[in-house]
Image: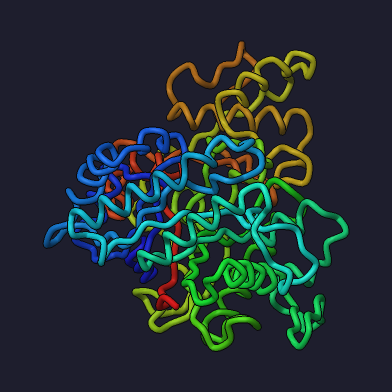
Amino acid sequence: MLKDNNFNKVKLFDTDENTLKALAGTDMEVMVAIPNKDLAGLQDADSALTWVEDHVKRYIFDGGVNIKYVGVANEPFLTSYNGTYVPLTFPALQNVQVALNKLDLGTKIKATVPMNADVLAESDKPSQGSFRSDVSAQMLQIVSFLNQNGCPYTVNIYPFISYATNKDFPENYAYFDSNIAQITDGDKVYTNTFDASYDTLVQALAVAGFPNMPIIVGEIGWATDGLPAATPANAQRFNQGFLNHVKDNKGTPLRPNTAIEYYLFGLLDEDNKDTAPGIFERHWGIFTFDGNAKYPLTVPGSPTNAVGDGTLVNATGVTHLPRRWCVAVANADPAKLAAPVNFACTNADCTQLTYGSSCNGLDSIGNASFAFNQYFQVQNQAAGSCSFEGLATTTTEDPSTGPCKFIVQIDPSASGAFRRVAGSARMMTAISLALSLLLLRAAPLL
């Protein structure tokens, strides 16, 4: 699927062995990552050296993996972490890059720290950009070290969250198809959130003494479910608008005529992702869990994909389990459905049933049917997984209605081309559960 769409770079959130083995020999540029939970184990140089030997160097050989970056943590300075990772991030970054240098990998592979945009202080205009006062000392350490070692700064930018969670946020400002000036900053005019967020970071880096530091947009995208604003149509509008916005290397008001390197978030939906930030967190995928494009998307460049038609290509060779669904029996007593529905949704993803989501309009029987089927498919249609004390039965008639889709699980024993895309069907399922891959359209570093 990645090859068919001519995606030549991927960003991982870990160093999963099966994933990296699948990427060997593809020449696909890769960013591997160290999860936040592993930062504590990289506070000394010897441990970091061992980690780099085991998770990076072992894949660097002729026909191996084209690793270009090591992401040290992911958004470690989020305010919701209450400072847990603040003292751990810089030592880990330093030790990892020093280890790369010691192993003669440092000129080819650079460490970076993907930061959330909330590491910036609140400001009304990009020209006021600076780092948050509570982490400014640590940020200066980090950006100074990045500069010394020729490493890029990585930032995640999400206009979706600003728009979808704030009823007063101007709709046009979230997208790229308006010429209405939302911010006038001296002689700079901003018509979209991305440019303003990006330039706020540019200014913060300049204030810190590094006006020309390379920047990678580590994540940008739009969710397709979980909130009223999270729809495939809106995701297509945003992502296509973003791709069109950056394709000609026009840059931003503070960095005009500059190519922007970016990763689209994400490849597939994640049905087991933590929903504390929002129900939408499980629905960022450009493709469905089984590799079907959710909406048309033309990626800049030619040819866009192997068939040359300029749109996304679905995964091929994906084998599903039998076309069979688990639904509530028609005469089920609604009073008896609550407990089994709760059980099903505790063990499977029912976020599509929440307010503003794709299945929100179902009645009580429909809600139960959706929940039962989610559990049934997660259990690979195992015998006994569609009983629910006699309140459910299987059917061969697709119960999907409108935007509410009842899935059929991928056959774990026969994955065909999906196995070739990512190593194995089981591994691709793991990606859908734990999001290992992002998509990137190539753009040169600044």
Left or right position of 355 against 86: right
**Which one is in front, 93 or 189?**
93
- What's the residue at 57%, 64% (across, down)? 295
Q: Is residue 388 above or below residue 120?
A: above
Left or right position of 330 against 204: right
Q: Pinpoint residue 444: horizontal percent, then vertical percent.
A: 40, 78
Q: Pinpoint residue 27: horizontal percent, then vertical percent.
A: 24, 66
Q: How many marks?
A: 0
- What's the residue at 48%, 72% (across, down)? 213
- What's the residue at 45%, 57% (across, down)? 438
Left or right position of 333 against 384: right
Q: Pinpoint residue 416: horizontal percent, then vertical percent.
A: 28, 50
Q: Quarter of the image containing the C terminus? A: bottom left
**Which one is in front, 82 or 10?**
82
Q: Residue furthest right?
A: 168
Q: How is the image coloured?
A: rainbow
Q: Pinpoint residue 358: horizontal percent, then vertical percent.
A: 70, 47
The quarter of the picture where residue 60 lies is bottom left
Q: Is residue 103 above or below residue 205?
A: above
- What's the residue at 66%, 58% (across, down)? 120
**Which one is in front, 438 or 205?**
205
Q: Residue furthest top?
A: 389
Q: Residue furthest left?
A: 62
Q: Quarter of the image containing the N terminus? A: bottom left
Q: Is residue 294 above or below residue 379?
A: below
Q: Is residue 260 above or below residue 109?
A: below
